[in-house]
Amino acid sequence: MEQKIYIETYGCQMNVNDSQVAASILVNEGCSITEDIHQADVILVNTCSVRDNAEKRVLGRLEVFHQEKKKRPNVIVGVMGCMAQRLREKLLENNNVDFSIGPDSYRSLPSVIKHISEGGEKLTETTLSKVETYADIDPVRVDSNGVTAFISIMRGCNNMCSYCIVPFTRGRERSRDPKSIEREAKQLVKEGFKEVTLLGQNVDSYLWTDPDNPTHTVNFAQLLELVALVNPKLRVRFQTSHPKDIRKGVLYTMAMYPNICPHIHLPVQSGSSRMLEKMNRKYTREEYLQKIQDIREILPDSAITTDIIAGFCSETDEDHKQTISLLKEVQYDSAFMFQYSQRPDTLAAKRYPDDVPEETKTARLNEIIALQNTISLAANKKCIGKTYEVLVEGTSKRSENQMIGRTPQNKVCVFDKKDCAPGDFVHVKVLSATSATLMGEIVKPRKYTQYDKNAYRL
Ligand code: SAH
Ligand code: SF4
Ligand code: F3S
C-alpha cells in the first residue's frame, strides 16, 4: 500500500494516542502520513461522542470532506473512534463516508482501505474486544512537540456513570502489559522526550495479571513506580483518576518519586450526593472531600483539577448550590466544566428525563465558570514570587521571543526565550498570573538537560 493518509483528531487524549496507533499500523504497511488534505488519498477522522456538540463538529467536517470527494472522487473517507462505534452503518448512509471503524478494530485499517480502494462495498468494523490494547504497536508521534508524549496504559471503562457514552464506545476495561508500557517509556526517552502521561479512563483501577502466573499482578501504584524508575529526569504524569478508586498507595508513590508530577485530575462531576448517586459515581460528597484531604496531607504541593457537569437530570437549585459550595471548599487549580448533554442509550437516557431547561443549564454553567475563574486566578496568583522547574515545550503562539512550558503542577507558563529550547528544564520565577497562565522569567539562565548531574528539582 502506498496511499497518503491524512488524519484529523477530535475528542480526548485517548483519541490523539489512537490516531498515532492507527498511523503506525498504516505506515508499517507502506502508507505515508500527510498534513495536506488536498494531497491525501485517504482522509481519516477520529471522532468523539461524549457530548452532542462534539458530534456536531465532526458532522460539519464530514461536509468539508465531501466537498473534497466531489473534486477528487477517488478519495476515501473513513470515520474512526467513538462516533464510528456508536453510529456504525448509520454514518455511511447520509454522510458520504466509505467506512466506519471502531476503537478496537484499527488493526483492520489496512485491509479495510484496500477493500474500498479496490472498489468494494462500504463497510463497518466495530467489534469491541476484551483484550486489544495495541501493546506491541509503537505510536507514530505525529503532531508531536518532541518533548511530551502520552502512553495508553489501559482501554475501555467498566464504570457505567449514568450520563456517559464512553463504556459503550470503548468497551470493557483492560490493562496493558506493564513491560510494554516500560518499553515504550524507555523508547521515548531515547528519542529525546522528557515527559510522559499515562492515560486511562480510570487509571486507579489499572490491574494487570500475568497470564503465565495469575498470582503475579501489577496495580497502578506499582506501574507508576516502574515508569518513574525508567529515568529520574523523565517527568511522569497520569490521567484520569477516579475518586472512588484512588488509593493512598498512589499518593505515597507520588510523594516518593520527585519525577512524578504533583498534579491530580480528580473529576467530581457534582457537589451534591443526590446527583452523584444518580450519576452512578459511587462516592458521596463527603467521601470525595476526604480524598481531597488525603491528597492535601500527603502531597501539600499538588495541584488538583476537576470536571463538572451542570444541569444533570432533575438537578435542583439546591443541588447546584452544593456544587458551588464544593468548588469554594476545594479551591481547584482549574476545571473543565460542561453542560449535561443527553447521550442515546446511556443509563440516564433510559431512566431519567433530561428535565433541566436549557436556559437553566446554561445559567448554572456560567455561574460555575465565573466562580472557578476567580478561584483559578487566586490559585495562580499564589505562585507569584515562587520559582518553578519548567519543562520548555515550544514557542508561544503570541510571540517568537517567548517560550511556553509547564510547571510540575501542570500550570502553563510563558517567559522570555533567553537561550532555552524545547526539551530544556529551566527555572522560572513567576511575576504575574491570569486564571489560565503564569508569566515569569528564567532565573537560572544556564540550561540543563535530564542527563546533567547538577540538575535538581525545586
Ligand atoms: N474517565 C474520565 C473522563 C471521561 S469524559 C472520568 O471518569 O472522569 C470527560 C468528562 O466529560 C467527564 O469527566 C464529564 O465531566 C464529561 N461528560 C461525560 N459525559 C457527559 C455528558 N453526557 N454531558 C456532559 N458532560 C459529560
Ligand atoms: Fe465515563 Fe464514568 Fe467511565 Fe469516566 S469513569 S469514562 S465518566 S463511565
Ligand atoms: Fe474520548 Fe470522546 Fe471517546 S472523550 S473516549 S473520544 S467519547
Image: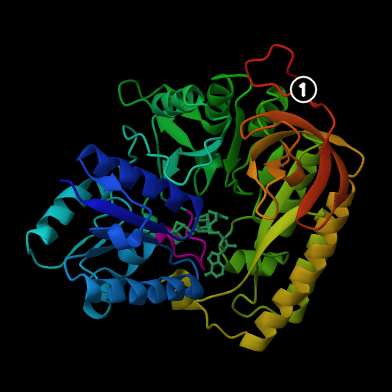
- Residue 350, given in percent of the width and then of the height, sits at 44, 77
In the rendered structure, the answer to whether residue 139 lies left or right of residue 112 reads right
The answer to whether residue 162 is magenta is yes
Residue 52 higher or lower than 326, as above or below: below
Q: Is residue 322 visible?
A: no
Residue placed most toward the observer, 224 or 434: 434
Residue, x 79% and y 61% (percent of image)? 327
Residue 380 higher or lower than 318, as above or below: above
Choose top left, top right, bottom left or bottom right for residue 310: bottom right
Q: Which residue is mark 1?
A: 446
The answer to whether residue 39 is magenta is no
Please tell me whether the stretch drawn in magenta is mainly helix, strand or loop.
loop
In the rendered structure, the answer to whether residue 199 lies left or right of residue 255 reads left
In the rendered structure, the answer to whether residue 131 lies left or right of residue 125 reads right
In the rendered structure, the answer to whether residue 266 lies left or right of residue 328 reads left
Q: Which residues are magenta?
A: 159-168
**Quadrant hosting ligand 1:** bottom right
Residue, x 64% and y 55% (percent of image)? 267
- Amino acid type at mark 1: Arg
| Color theme of the render | rainbow
